[in-house]
Image (spheres, grey):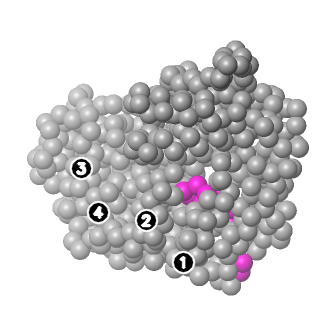
Amino acid sequence: LVAVIDFGSQYTQLIVRRVRELGYMAKLYALEDLDQIHEPGAVILSGGPKSTTDADAPDIDFEWLQSLNVPVLGVCYGMQLLNIKHGGTVKASNKREYGPAALLPETCVGLYRDMSPSSQVWMSHSDTVDHLAEGCRVIARNAEGVPVSLQWGETTFGIQFHPEVTHSHEGRTILRNFLSCAANLKKFDIGDFKRELIREIRERVGNRQVVCGVSGGVDSTVLAVLLHEAGVNMRAIFVDNGLLRKNEAEEVRANFARMNVEIETVDASERFLAALDGESDPEKKRRIIGGLFIDVFWDAVGDAEMLAQGTLYPDVIESASNAKSKASVIKTHHNRVERVLELQAQGKVLEPLAELFKDEVRELGASMGIPHDILWRHPFPGPGLAVRCPGVVTKERLDIIRECDAIFIGNLKKYGWYDKVWQAYAGLIPVKTVGVKGDERSYEWATNLRAIVSEDAMTADWVELPPALLRETSNRILNEVKGINRVLYDISTKPPASIEWE
Ligand code: XMP
């Protein structure tokens, strides 16, 4: 096991992820939990926001660290701490060095085996090492000749930069070189990882009842199946807000049935439609839906002994840093509402996926036999079709969207494009235009088709779908969907447009 000790950097979990990508088991430990680390094969000290010169700078029991007798890598704050522990000093500075820098290794063995003579790394620090203790070697400098990497003895290293971010071009090689100094590291295996998660879940839950919300999306599905596999007393609640796609509620129920996981459905569609009646302001619509969801969900939950949430690592980071994206605000909304915070204070919130990234959640899901189509479902917003229906939301409008969307998504699958796009949907443009249907004049609404690719939803590009796919979709919508006489394809990038229309 590679033990990564957290000094509070934004990137700490990325280190864990990178080690897992290199094929080794890694786990993040808070400074208070060092007693839980048993016989690690290597230790990495993360970066952190504090200065080692602060009075309340986080510290580590150096005797304990040395007694482990394993390779140690200090990153940023970790390196400065190691320098102090070995008898050197650190200089505080008000100037922050942030961004790309050159790394010039002074050796081509050990940490810098197989590296370019000059390589870009990513810096994010203000303090720098000052005095180096006897026996400490400088193993790399930046372009100005300032030491940015140190070595003590055979296998204790320090680096001022962040190898875990992709802006450090050869970061992966550096981490691999570090890990190759360790003997008998445990290989990362998703099955072992799952067993460990299940062990932790059982230990925390005991014989209490744990409630979780399911939406049919990837994260909540993997969570519910994991709890089910752990064999704990679980209630999974699915709220049908009436803003779902065609047959979606039935599909979600059928999907859970085929995985033998029992879910309770709360059909609140009438309540949501009534609450939205006559409202056309996008933000007000969102607030109505978000607020009612919380009411309906917590009514169904009642007095929870424990609540499980499918929070992933990027959500944890986004909530912490108050990222501005709508999705993260809404997630914060659902995952961090007052009621949840109260339960959290009582130690009643379980977030077993909080260490994982999306692709790792999918891998975990696949290892539990969750079908591919569920794991690779496109993202779907919490407020559902309401954000694809500008203006007022009515059952008639929603039904039209559902029909257009089903035809479009069906064709994406038929033509093999569903898995190639990140998200796709049909929405409604409630503007009537004139057309001809049969021999009659028609005066009907338009539908907009949107298909985008994205990495993280922050930016997006529209997809050049094959004309045959678009043509068949358009023909079918115009022929089959009552109320639509025009089909438009949305060719807007994000920014400046967003993925959804509201
Ligand atoms: P926008 O429209 O902001 O969407 O470009 C970015 C991504 O976030 C999804 N989205 C949401 N997801 N609750 C969610 O869970 C929301 O309120 C919400 N609004 C947008 C959207 O589908 C896209 O994937």
Which percent across, then down, holds residue 344? Answer: 71, 63
- The amino acid beneath tag 1 is Glu
What residue is pinned by disc 1? 229
Which percent across, then down, holds residue 40? Answer: 34, 72
What residue is pinned by disc 3? 174
Question: For the residues marked 2 and 4, what is the alpha-carbon distance in whole angstroms?
Answer: 18 Å
Q: Quadrant of residue 287?
A: top right
Query: Does the stretch in magenta take in 215?
Result: yes
- The amino acid beneath tag 3 is Ile
User: Which residue is at 61% across, 65% downward?
Assistant: 254
Q: How crowded is mark 2: few (under 14 residues within 10 Å), some or many (20 or more)?
A: some
Question: For the residues marked 3 and 4, what is the alpha-carbon distance in whole angstroms?
Answer: 15 Å
What residue is pinned by disc 4? 23
Q: In this view, does 353 lie above or below 14?
A: below
Q: Earlier in the sequence, mark 1 or mark 4?
A: 4
Query: Does the stretch in magenta take in 470?
Result: no
- Quarter of the picture holding the N terminus: bottom left
Disc 2 on helix, strand or loop? helix
Disc 4 on helix, strand or loop? loop
